[in-house]
Amino acid sequence: MSTKDKIWNLLEEIPDPEIPVLTIHDLGIVRKIDEINNEIIVTITPTYSGCPAMNQFEADIVTTLNKYGYDKVSIVTTYDPPWTTDWLSEEAKKKLQDYGIAPPEQKTTDKNALLVDDRKSVTCPQCKSTNSKMISQFGSTACKSLYQCNELYGAISTI
């Protein structure tokens, strides 16, 4: 197994501090791994520019790789291309649904679509009804929207 493959496997274990059922691999924020002169360079993209979890991601990446003997580790943050929910793995979407967060139902590489979200409903992760409405474009974090299930009359978070 190559060094890059070993590192990808190690990074698959690092949880998202805001949604602990997801890993940084599930989120798709790890964009690239390079090894130059025995230094591991991990390139990551935040889910949005003000994401408070990024410092934790960086610390967790360095700590994890140091733990397994990779002493020289650098983190590079890139905003180009910007993160999109298209980068979520199918496994991540299933984990979100099981956790009670409605996963994205359509692909979007256009960040404007997220800002002017014209979806009329999302599928409730509990009852699977699409009879829902947006309550707030921003939920518990700025990267989530808040919907209400009209069948259960409960709040639905969606990423």
Image (spheres, rainbow, N blue to C red):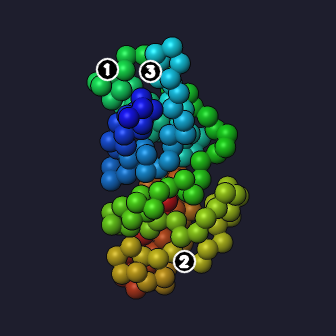
* Mark toward the start of the polypeptide (2 vs 3): 3
Q: Residue furthest top?
A: 37
Marks 2 and 1, how far apart at CA: 48 Å
For residue 73, the mark is 3
Secondary structure beneath label 1: loop
Q: Residue beneath label 2, please?
A: 121
Secondary structure beneath label 2: loop
For residue 69, the mark is 1
Instruction: Name which residue type carries label 2.
Output: Ser
- In contact (CB < 8 Å): disc 3 and disc 1: no
Secondary structure beneath label 3: strand
Query: Residue 141's x, y, as percent?
Result: 47, 51
Q: Is residue 69 above or below residue 158?
A: above
- Mark 2 or 3, which is nearer the eye? 3
> Is 49 situated left or right of 144 in this image?
right
Q: Nearer the viewer, residue 60 or 156?
A: 60
Marks 2 and 3, how far apart at CA: 43 Å
What residue is at 37 percent from the left and 16 percent from the top? 71
